Amino acid sequence: MRYSKRRASNAGSDKCDGISMDSLITAAARALAVGDPLGALKRVALREDAPALALRGIAMAQLGDLVRAKTLMRRAARAFGPKEAVARARCIVAEAEIALVSRDLGWRPQALDAARATLEEHGDRVNAAHARHLEVRRLLLIGRLDEAERTLAKLDPAPFPPASRAAHELVVAGIAMRRLRIKQARAALVRAEVAAHAAGIPALTAEVQSAFLVLNTPAARLVARGEERLLLLEEVAAILESGALVVDACRYVVRDETRVVSLAKRPVLFVLARVLGEAWPGDASRGTLVARAFRAKVADESHRARLRVEAGRLRSVLRTLAHVSATQRGFALAPRRAREVVVLARPVEEEHAAVLAFLADGESWSSSALALALGTSQRTVQRALDSLAAAAKIQSFGRGRARRWMTPPMPGFTTTLLLPAPLPIG
């Protein structure tokens, strides 16, 4: 949950269900507001009352000890009495944010939804909206864009304080980037930047700046007529709107301006389509097609027979987009309406590129969360993680269910978490 310096400065006059906050709680809240979790801990580290437990949880989250932070928030939620429903609800929302940042996507959305309803019932619209934003961010992580958009549409950011408006615009930008609506994403980030500066929370400003970097980072690789070049998100959007026949190796689809054919569940057909797209306007040899699609070093008669069968299946699947015809050397792709054929590939490709793409956000992921986000089994993800770890491309910490995976931090850059969260008791 987010708060501004203005709210923290008024913390001394706030009450929670008739209980006034004492001076140490007020001082700890102000320390957290200016990004000083150690200063907050000095004031409440030895206290076991519910407000102090909540503040200690927020401080530990800011210091990056998410496991301890989650434990403290749960203790705080239990410590608040039955008449302190709002305080408990705020603790649940804070715990949900900690789970989201630690990429623990297995936490119960129902608990967050119930907490949000409690906050709305008691008039705490800001924290209720923050709970909604957390819900949308989770939906974004697992790729449920339509549901994320519907949920976000229920919120009007106009009456929110600056920090909440910045959070709202960041979510708007995130959805727009996934949809490749780059102008809309850029406009949302500009609004987020203005709101973040007004909020005066350094971590929030840094988050906005990080989102801007995504727009200026290579998002794909274009392969066309034997040449390759890296593309920004804006250029990817332009390619998709250019009228070309696009073999999209990022989403495993073949598309033109009017139609999209998914081959995500037919990997052999997609590999054939990609090889033919890379060879366009020429043809691809049978040897190349067999080697790429079937991973065979030498094409024997059985491979050639299988290639004819798979080429026939590809011809049937792509019949509305392109012709797949046999040539003397192999096979060729000819678009029906488009004048150009291009291939979009990931900027860096390797066997476990999808797993690396999620870990590239710098956060720590559990294998179960990765499996949920990728839509595959946890065992498949675990094999990929073990392979990447053996190659020293990722690292892990913790054991058992607490084990998390992340890419090694880059020298010269910090990855300290700063959760801009408000007092669960304010």
Image (cartoon, rainbow, N blue to C red):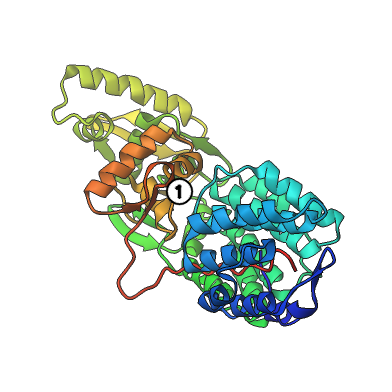
Asked whether residue 98 is in view, the answer is no
| Image x and y of residue 290, in percent | 23, 30
Asked whether residue 23 is in view, the answer is yes
The relative height of residue 247 versus residue 419 in the rendered view (above or below) is: above
Foreground pick, 4 / 27: 27
User: In the image as oriented, which residue stretches furthest toward the left?
Assistant: 298
Q: Quadrant of residue 165?
A: bottom right
Quarter placement of the N terminus: bottom right
Secondary structure type for disc 1:
loop
The residue depicted at 74 percent of the width and 50 percent of the height is 115
Q: How many numbered markers are drawn?
A: 1
The relative height of residue 291 versus residue 394 in the rendered view (above or below) is: above
The residue depicted at 35 percent of the width and 23 percent of the height is 310
The relative height of residue 2 versus residue 268 in the rendered view (above or below) is: below
Foreground pick, 24 / 365: 24
The residue depicted at 32 percent of the width and 45 percent of the height is 278
| Residue that label 1 marks | 339
| Image x and y of residue 113, in percent | 73, 47
Position of residue 292 in the picture relative to residue 12 (left or right):
left
The relative height of residue 81 versus residue 18 in the rendered view (above or below) is: above
Position of residue 74 in the picture relative to residue 88 (left or right):
left
Q: Residues within 10 Å of mark 1 (few under 14, many from 20)?
A: few
Quarter placement of the C terminus: bottom right
Q: In the image, what residue type sits under mark 1?
A: Arg
| Image x and y of residue 244, in percent | 47, 50
Foreground pick, 27 / 271: 27
| Image x and y of residue 3, in percent | 68, 72
Foreground pick, 373 / 320: 373
Q: Quadrant of residue 7?
A: bottom right
